[in-house]
Image: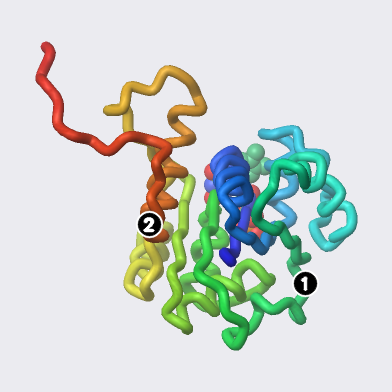
């Protein structure tokens, strides 16, 4: 089981694609959202999630529509951001690791400083203290010194900092190709074979 946290940074399509992949390939997922994530999911993807992610029933109803049960092999469990009794709030519960995608600079800073103000941040904190894989996918540009120092702190604490910065050498033709590039890198960072983008095997200089 993996934890996926979605924050209010731009790029929620990366999270949607990653969740699709996990659920179709039989990985169980525990999902956390922040209030800002709900706003961005509504704006960028048209998910009709409630403004307040503490409305767990409302979020779960939308998840049933976005990820219909017949298309899932893995289980999808949603936890509200104030659900401090959730298993993922404790290091005693066993799960494989966590991806924060996309990760806002606010959440990156709070995880870097161990503030754990919501369940998403607490689950990331648990990953770091238990030495479990934590992949943080920040999205912001340009980056301030504060952002860079917070990302450095995360890397020093053991997180993989994997910016949402797709490459172009696989010659993307569609938006989905760019999304697949980043999702593939996330899967590889978790030690899984991505398979969404073929590995670079060298190429001719055609110019
Ligand atoms: C449409 C939209 C796009 C945003 N994009 C970013 C972004 O790319 N990176 C970022 O750090 N914040 C972005 N923000 C601002 C965050 O949502 C805001 O800082 C929020 O407090 C983050 O809260 P969270 O970390 O709890 O999700 C965006 C906000 C909106 C409404």
Which residue is label 2 attached to?
Answer: 189
Horizontal relation, residue 87 to residue 107: left or right: right
Q: Position of residue 195 (x, y in %)?
A: 39, 41
Secondary structure of residue under mark 2? helix
Instruction: Give the quarter of the image for residue 121.
Output: bottom right
Q: Let me know if residue 144 appears in the view.
A: no
Q: Is residue 63 above or below residue 178?
A: below
Horizontal relation, residue 164 to residue 205: left or right: right
Please report contact status of discs 1 and 2: CB closer than 8 Å, yes or no: no
Secondary structure of residue under mark 1? loop
Q: Tally the numbered discs.
A: 2
Q: Let me know if residue 4 appears in the view.
A: yes
Q: Position of residue 25 (x, y in %)?
A: 56, 49
Q: Nearer the viewer, residue 151 or 28?
A: 28
Q: Residue at x 66, y 51 (%)?
A: 73
Residues packed near mark 1 inside 10 Å, few (<14), some (14 to 19) or many (20 plus): some
Q: Residue at x 14, y 31 (%)?
A: 202
Q: Residue at x 50, y 24 (%)?
A: 175
Q: Residue at x 74, y 48 (%)?
A: 38
Q: CA distance from mark 1 to mark 2?
A: 28 Å
> Nearer the viewer's eye, disc 1 or disc 2?
2
Q: Position of residue 112 (x, y in %)?
A: 47, 71
* Quadrant into which the C terminus falls: top left
Q: Position of residue 71 (x, y in %)?
A: 71, 42
Q: Is residue 38 above or below residue 57?
A: above
Residues packed near mark 2 inside 10 Å, few (<14), some (14 to 19) or many (20 plus): some
**Which numbered disc, 1 or 2, marks the residue that appears first in the sequence?**
1
Instruction: Give the quarter of the image for residue 115.
Output: bottom right
Q: Nearer the viewer, residue 156 or 202?
A: 202
Instruction: Give the quarter of the image for residue 76.
Output: bottom right
Q: Which mark is residue 190?
A: none
Which residue is label 1 attached to?
Answer: 82
């Amino acid at each position: 089981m993996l934890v996926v946290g979605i924050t209010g940074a731009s790029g929620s399509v990366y999270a949607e694609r990653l969740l699709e992949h996990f659920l179709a390939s039989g990985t169980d997922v525990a999902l956390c959202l922040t209030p800002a994530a709900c706003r961005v999911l509504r704006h960028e993807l048209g998910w009709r999630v409630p403004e307040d992610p503490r409305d767990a029933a409302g979020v779960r109803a939308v998840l049933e529509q976005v990820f219909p049960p017949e298309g899932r092999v893995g289980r999808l469990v949603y936890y509200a951001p104030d659900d401090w009794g959730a298993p993922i709030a404790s290091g005693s519960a066993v799960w494989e690791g966590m991806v924060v995608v996309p990760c806002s600079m606010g959440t990156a800073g709070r995880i870097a400083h161990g503030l754990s103000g919501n369940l998403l941040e607490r689950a990331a904190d648990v990953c770091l203290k238990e030495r479990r894989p934590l992949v943080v996918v920040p999205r912001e540009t340009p980056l301030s010194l504060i952002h860079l120092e917070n990302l450095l702190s995360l890397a020093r604490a053991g997180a993989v900092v994997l910016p949402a910065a797709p490459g172009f050498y696989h010659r993307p033709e569609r938006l989905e190709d760019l999304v697949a590039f980043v999702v593939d890198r996330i899967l590889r960072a978790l030690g899984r074979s991505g398979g969404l983008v073929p590995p670079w095997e060298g190429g001719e200089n055609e110019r």
